[in-house]
């Protein structure tokens, strides 16, 4: 299998590549292991919790936590681990994580696939309904709860900030 972390970040001037690790509806978190070049089990989620959308990373980036930049791909379909989607960045939520007294940034990018007709009107993550934002924040908190990580949301930002974040973290 190709080392998916080394794919180009940008598909073109407006779209990034997003590698799906964990598909929508999964009750466990998968992650790509670049050394083994396979997907491995990162952790099971709490009972009853599932991923609301496809979850993955932006290749050829390195975030503050040392991993590629996380991405939540908002669309109405479920894909599979290893699928590469051409996506338009629509925002980013800045997050700090505290674990064992250590605080680090772990921002999450939001994107929509270019071939997802139901999401073409979603231009900015800040335009999601308040309830959707609250549910996403609770999901992020819940996925870290079993690891005793404490999340602090520092701010929701639009597509311009997302593009700047990607460019800053691209290798």
Image (cartoon, rainbow, N blue to C red):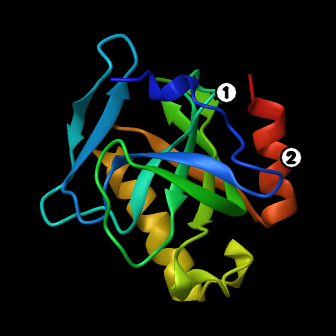
Q: CA distance from mark 1 to mark 2?
A: 15 Å
Q: Does dot 1 land on a helix, a strand or a loop? A: loop
In the image, 42 versus 1, the foreground residue is: 1
Q: Which mark is residue 64?
A: 1
Q: Is residue 86 left or right of residue 94?
A: left
Q: Residues within 10 Å of mark 2 (few under 14, many from 20)?
A: few
Q: Residue 64's x, y, as percent?
A: 67, 27
Q: State the residue at coordinates (65%, 25%).
A: 62
Image quarter hosting the N terminus: top left
Q: Does dot 2 land on a helix, a strand or a loop? A: helix
Q: Is residue 107 left or right of residue 144?
A: right
Image quarter hosting the C terminus: top right
Mark 2 highlights which residue? 164
Nearest to N terminus: mark 1 or mark 2: 1
Against 33, residue 82 (above or below) is below
In the image, 65 versus 62, the foreground residue is: 62
Whether residue 120 is visible: yes
Q: Which mark is residue 12?
A: none
Q: Is residue 15 left or right of residue 149?
A: right
Q: State the residue at coordinates (75%, 31%).
A: 169
Q: Residue 27's x, y, as percent?
A: 18, 56
Q: Residue 84's x, y, as percent?
A: 47, 47
Q: Residues within 10 Å of mark 1 (few under 14, many from 20)?
A: few
Discs 1/2, front: 2
Against 129, residue 94 (above or below) is above
């Amino acid at each position: 299998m190709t080392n998916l972390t080394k794919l180009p970040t940008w598909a073109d001037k407006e779209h990034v590549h997003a590698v799906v690790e964990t598909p929508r509806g999964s009750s466990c978190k998968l992650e790509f292991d670049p050394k083994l070049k396979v997907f491995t089990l990162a952790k099971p989620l709490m009972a009853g919790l599932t991923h609301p959308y496809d979850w993955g990373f932006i290749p050829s980036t390195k975030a503050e936590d040392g991993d590629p930049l996380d991405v939540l791909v908002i669309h109405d379909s479920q894909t599979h681990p290893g699928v590469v989607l051409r996506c338009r960045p629509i925002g980013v939520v800045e997050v700090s994580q505290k674990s064992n007294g250590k605080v680090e940034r772990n921002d999450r990018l939001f994107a929509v696939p270019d071939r997802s007709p139901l999401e073409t009107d979603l231009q900015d993550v800040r335009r999601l309904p308040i309830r959707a934002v609250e549910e996403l924040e609770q999901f992020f908190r819940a996925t870290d709860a079993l690891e005793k990580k404490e999340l602090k949301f520092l701010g929701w930002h639009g597509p311009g900030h997302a593009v700047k974040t990607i460019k800053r973290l691209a290798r």
